[in-house]
Amino acid sequence: MKVRSLFIFMLAVSVCVFGAQCASSQKKEPSAKDQYQLASKYLEKTEYIKAIEAFQTLVYNFPGSEWVDAGQYGLAESYFRSKDYVNAVFEYERIVNDFSMSPLVEKAQFKIAMCYFKQSLDAVRDQENTYQAIQGFLTFLEDYPDSPLAKEAQTKYAICRAKLAEKAYRNGELYLKMGQTEAALLYFREVLDTFGDTSWIHHARYGIGCALLKQGERDEARQAFEQVVRNGTEERLKQKAQKKLKEMEKGG
C-alpha cells in the first residue's frame, strides 16, 4: 500500500514538473515591437542607461525588423538626451548611412548638426564644433529645404555664424590692444568679408576706425566711424563712434 502511494506521489510530481516545463517553453518571446515599446518607456522616464541597453537589444537582435530603424533612432536619442553627444553623432550617422530610405533620416541629419551645436564653446575658445554644426545645418537645409525643422536649422546656423564673427572680432580687438594694427585689421576685415550678415560688422567697422586712426589714416578712420553712426544697430557702439569723431574734430 505504501509503495502504491509513493508511486502515485512520484507520478504527480512528474506531471507538475512536466507541466511547468511546457508552460515555460510556451512563454511568448518579446517581439521587436515589444522591445521597442519597452525601450521607449525607459526613454520617456529618462532612464537613459536602460533605454540604451533596450534599444541596443532591438537593433542587434532584430536586424531585419520593420522596427529596427526606429530602434536605431531611439538609441541615438537616448545618447542625445543624456548629453553624450559624441556617441549620439555616431548613432545618428548610422541611420543616415545604413537606413537611407527611412523617414527618420531627415530628423537624424538635423540632430547630427544639433549635437555639434550643443558642443560649441564660447566665442573666445576653440570653434571646431561650431564649424561642424554650420556644415551640418547647411547639409540639412540643402537636403530638406521644406522641412518643418528648416526654420530652427536656419536660426541655429545664424547663431553659429555670429559666434565665428565674434571670434574674429575678439581676435582683432586683442591685437589692437597689443598695438599690432595690421593684424587687427586683418581680423576686423574678415568679419566684414566673411560674416557680413551678422551684427558684428558694426563692431568690426569701429575696430577698423580705431586701427586706422592709430596708423594715422584719419580720413579712412573717419569714414569707418561715420558708417557705424549711420548704420550701427547698438546705441552704445554708435555713441562710441560719435565720441571718436568729436575727438578727431578737436584734433585728437
Image (tube, rainbow, N blue to C red):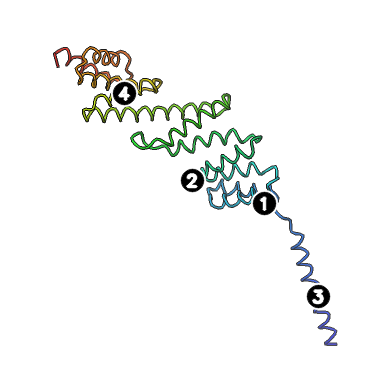
Instruction: Please name the residue shown 29% across and 16% down the image.
Output: 228
Residue 180: image location, x then y, percent: 23, 27
Dot label at residue 84: 2
Residue underneath mark 4: 188
Indicate the amino acid at tag 1.
Answer: Asn
Front residue of this view, candidates 8 and 157: 157
Provide the secondary structure element on which disc 3 rests. Answer: helix
Front residue of this view, candidates 46 and 248: 248
Residue underneath mark 1: 61
Q: Locate residue 52 relative to residue 229 in the image: left or right.
A: right
Q: Are marks 4 and 1 in contact (CB under 8 Å)?
A: no
The mark lying in front, picked from 4 and 2, is: 4
Residue underneath mark 3: 12
User: Around disc 4, counting alpha carbons within 10 Å, would you say few (fewer than 14), some (14 to 19), or many (20 or more)?
Assistant: many
Q: Is residue 74 above or below residue 166?
A: below
Q: Is residue 230 above or below residue 109?
A: above
Residue 225: image location, x then y, percent: 26, 16
Q: Are marks 4 and 2 in contact (CB under 8 Å)?
A: no
Q: Earlier in the sequence, mark 4 or mark 3?
A: 3
Instruction: Please name the residue shown 46% across and 27% down the image.
Output: 155
Q: Earlier in the sequence, mark 1 or mark 3?
A: 3
How far apart marks 1 and 3 lie (CA) works out to 39 Å
Provide the secondary structure element on which disc 1 rests. Answer: helix
Indicate the amino acid at tag 3.
Answer: Ala
Where does the C terminus fall, quadrant-wise? top left
Q: Are marks 4 and 3 in contact (CB under 8 Å)?
A: no
**Splitting the image into 4 quarters, where does residue 174 fall?**
top left
Q: Earlier in the sequence, mark 4 or mark 2?
A: 2
Instruction: Please name the residue shown 63% across and 41% down the image.
Output: 70
Q: Are marks 3 and 2 in contact (CB under 8 Å)?
A: no
Dot label at residue 140: none
The mark lying in front, picked from 3 and 2, is: 2
